[in-house]
Image: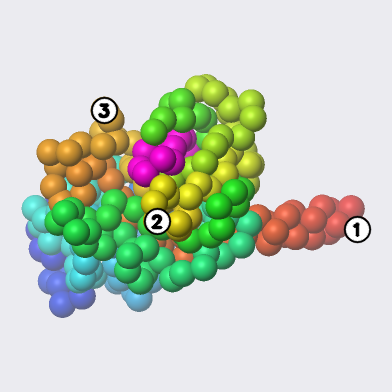
Amino acid sequence: MLEIGGSVGKAGVNRPEDILVVKYLLNRNGHLLAPYSPLLEDANLNSRTLALIERYQERITLMTRPDRRVDPHGKTIRHLNINAREESSGEIPPIIYPLENWAEQDIRSEPASFAALRKDGRRHAGCDLYAPADTPVLAIKDGRIITKPYPFYLGTMALEVDHGNCVVRYGELDRIAVGLEIGTIISAGQLIAYIGELDGLGVSMLHMEMYTGRTPGPLTDRGNLPFLRRGDLINPTSFLESAVLISERRDDDADRTRAARA
């Protein structure tokens, strides 16, 4: 485990040797910071480094008010070490938005938002993307189906996908796309399911949860407050805010193909 002797970031001690460690670890956590371009691993603490610390704190350490600072023996440095990969991350594109069009409600507003308080005192473990029932649900990245569809909430279903850099639970579904089963390899933007309607409420949405994949076991853990979820739960909000629509990705691919032929 890599350690720092003093705090790095906003109002930190910011010793050159500690800045180098934090940048090194951020580059090895790029898979959790998409879209991501590697940092230059030098002793310069610039605004982009601070922004990435903030993004990491919101997504991974689940801080409601990220402080843009990595403290010795603190939660951020611990997670940076736990989730670090051996190799530095290269360029990582944004995820594909899981619907063909943007959701009807802002995912930072309640009750759709991550960590929104529920009546029973728990915190919302994902983001809700409101859309009409039967709306197609798309895979956010290449991946592999790891569960059968199973009952989830108020008559809807859920499906879990290992996307390599994360595990996603796609919840509040009506049905799964034909031909998908455990072990099926899927591509980014592929149709995987359709949104369902919640029995008795008359509303429909995609409920999306994300996990680092570092912790084994069921995603639901009713003894783990306040989210009642597995310990590697992460906040999908900024992943979704930086996502691209499948139509935009197709346009980009077409432009690249035309350029290659020119």
Q: Residue, x 44% and y 37% (percent of image)? A: 157
Mark closest to the chain's N terminus, 2 or 1: 2
Q: Which residue is mark 3?
A: 217
Give how far across and how far down residue 155 sits, in percent: 41, 40
Q: Which residue is mark 2?
A: 201
Query: In the rendered image, which quarter is residue 101 located in?
Result: bottom right
Q: Is residue 195 left or right of residue 16?
A: right
Image marks 3 and 2: residues in contact by CB distance under 8 Å: no
Figure coloring = rainbow
Q: Nearer the viewer, residue 27 or 174?
A: 174
**CA–CA distance in space, label 1 to label 3:** 51 Å
- The quarter in which the C terminus is drawn is bottom right
Magenta range is 152-164
Q: Nearer the viewer, residue 237 or 197?
A: 197
Q: Amino acid at mark 3?
A: Gly
Q: Is residue 139 left or right of residue 218?
A: right
- Of circles 2 and 1, the one toward us is 2
